[in-house]
């Protein structure tokens, strides 16, 4: 029991530090973008102008990662799960939940970016 709890604490620590690193990099990118665009308003206009290209970029990333996951990574995960003593049923259920949560995150990202895309369509 103690080993399980220690590994969870370690996993949460890694998770928190990973998110902190993502936030620091995102804030640094925004700071560079704002300084290059000569202000926050101009930076916002630049983001609105590139909205369709950013959407194409994200769709491309989703397709590449999704294809790699479906063709390479998921079969390997299932093979590892099948070697478990219970046939991997519990691990399979967790994997399905994680996949669904990932899809919810993708939808949330695209919904959050929808106003920029709508602004671009109205302006063009």
Image (tube, rainbow, N blue to C red):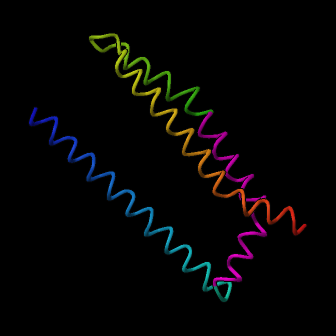
Q: Does the magenta stretch include residue 63?
A: yes
State the predominant SS element of the stretch in magenta: helix
Count the labels in the image. 0
Q: Is residue 124 above or below residue 34?
A: above
Q: Position of residue 77 (x, y in %)?
A: 43, 24
Left or right, residue 103 beside residue 38: left
Answer above or below: position of 2 versus 118: above
Quadrant of the frame with the N terminus: top left
Residue 4 lies in quadrant = top left
Q: Which residue is drawn at 75% across and 69% down?
A: 48
Q: Residue at x 37, y 13 (%)?
A: 82
User: Which residue is at 64% across, 40% downward?
Assistant: 64
**Foreground: 54 or 80?**
54
Q: In which quarter of the image is the C terminus?
A: bottom right
Where is residue 21, by image quadrant?
bottom left
Q: Is residue 22 left or right of residue 83?
A: right
Which residue reaches farthest right?
124
Say left or right for 12 vs 45: left
Residue 95 appears left or right of 120: left
Magenta segment, which residues? 40-66
Q: Which residue corresponds to the image point at 39% horizontal and 58% vertical from the top-left?
A: 19
On the image, the x and y values in percent for residue 107 come to 62, 45
Q: Residue 74: within the magenta?
A: no
Q: In the current view of this chain or complex, which residue is farthest to the bottom?
A: 38
Residue 50 rendering spot, x and y as whole percentages:
76, 66
Query: In the picture shown, does residue 1 fall above or below 15?
Result: above
């Amino acid at each position: 029991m103690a080993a399980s709890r220690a590994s969870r604490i370690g996993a949460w620590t890694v998770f928190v530090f990973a998110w902190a690193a993502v936030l620091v990099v995102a804030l640094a990118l925004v700071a560079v973008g704002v300084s290059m665009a000569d202000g926050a308003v101009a930076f916002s206009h630049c983001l609105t102008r590139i909205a369709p290209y950013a959407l194409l970029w994200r769709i491309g990333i989703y397709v590449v990662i999704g294809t790699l996951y479906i063709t390479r990574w998921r079969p390997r995960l299932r093979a590892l799960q099948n070697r478990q003593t219970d046939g991997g049923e519990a691990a399979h259920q967790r994997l399905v939940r994680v996949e669904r949560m990932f899809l919810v995150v993708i939808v949330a990202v695209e919904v959050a970016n929808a106003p920029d895309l709508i602004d671009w369509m109205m302006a063009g």
